[in-house]
Image (spheres, coloured by chain):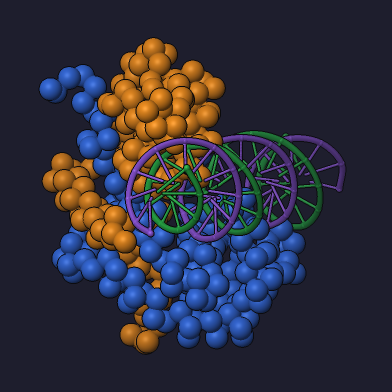
Chain colours: A orange, B blue, C green, D purple
Amino acid sequence: MGDKYEALKLKNQLCFPLYACSKEIVKAYKQYLDEIDLTYTQYITMMVMWEHKELRVKDVGKYLYLDSGTLTPLLKRLEEKGYIKRQRSAEDERDLIVTITESGEALKERAVKVPEKLGACVDLDAEKAQALYSILYEIIGKLTAHENDK
Amino acid sequence: MGDKYEALKLKNQLCFPLYACSKEIVKAYKQYLDEIDLTYTQYITMMVMWEHKELRVKDVGKYLYLDSGTLTPLLKRLEEKGYIKRQRSAEDERDLIVTITESGEALKERAVKVPEKLGACVDLDAEKAQALYSILYEIIGKLTAHENDK
DNA sequence: AAAATATAGATTGTGCGCAATTAAATTTTA
DNA sequence: TAAAATTTAATTGCGCACAATCTATATTTT
């Protein structure tokens, strides 16, 4: 009862439900994303491409908190599917520019119902959704604050 | 401007900060878990073992929302490290019984400071922590509700 | 101009995470 | 009680996710 190991019990963890919830949501996406042949990570990558049309790999990574180890193979797969193009920048050969294709733009139309379908699965009160959203970004902010120092 | 694609923007996603936050937290754990040679998933697995001492793989999976595809190799690694034992049940040979070892029990002592160290990183208001906790379990409940039907 | 430093992306290796399949043991049902 | 259905874990294959390292290019310093 209230022993010194209380903090090590699963039910007293805040991080565990976060981890579990994230996984379950990605799993819930699968049924809808399968229809448009995207994984969850590919889907959020397309999201930033739909919005920005053209980005360096580095910028995609900044939006998604992902590095080149994840993005390089993922972007190659999206290129194989025809949704993006990858080409080195002429001004700076170190940069790789990712550009959305027509096929990629067209995919947006097929993805447009995904958010509401998922919303129906989760079905969260608007107030709670807002609370969740702001708390999550608060934590993300704290954890990534020291990312651009040094 | 409130176009039909508004719902496909990253900033309007609730799932994305959940996914990102979960990853960043696991990353934050790494510095502390490295010291005791555990990954995050191994850590939460040890958590259920510290609490229950002896469980079937199936039960570990129920607590953690993980299946044998993830757990079988993970438990083998924990066995190699000497923290658990794996043996078939005598009553029902299908069951694999996972038991904590003395070394596994001893590890608990080395892990006891991890929760507060991580708490310091996240540093979340108690009220927000409670709100987050209950909203997350509400979502998990909705997403896993139909898991035991069929 | 040469050397040192910095930056961007690619590569490598390890460990999940999960769908789908397989194999073995047990339980149910006909 | 033999056949069918179910249960449990292991296996396979694929795609992240990330630390560490490497390569190429660009910038800064000397």
Q: Residue at x 65, y 58 (%)?
A: B73
Residue A39: percent from the left, percent from the top? 47, 33
* Front position in the image: B111 or D21: D21
Q: Quadrant of the N terminus of chain B?
A: top left
Q: Is residue A115 left or right of residue B44?
A: left
Q: Is residue B138 left or right of residue D11?
A: left
Residue A49: percent from the left, percent from the top? 34, 27
Q: Residue at x 36, y 56 (%)?
A: B24
Q: Is residue D20 left or right of residue B3?
A: right
Does the rendering let one see residue A45?
no
* Front position in the image: B11 or B141: B11
Residue B87 picture quarter = bottom right
Q: Residue at x 45, y 66 (%)?
A: B30
Task: Look at the picture and state if B81 lies above or below B60.
Answer: below
Residue A132: percent from the left, percent from the top? 21, 50
Residue B13 picture quarter = top left
* Front position in the image: D5 or B140: B140
Task: Look at the picture and state if C7 lies above or below A74.
Answer: below
Task: Look at the picture and state if D21 lies above or below B147.
Answer: below
Q: Residue at x 43, y 73 (%)?
A: B32
Residue A51: percent from the left, percent from the top? 27, 26
Q: Is residue B139 left or right of residue B108?
A: left
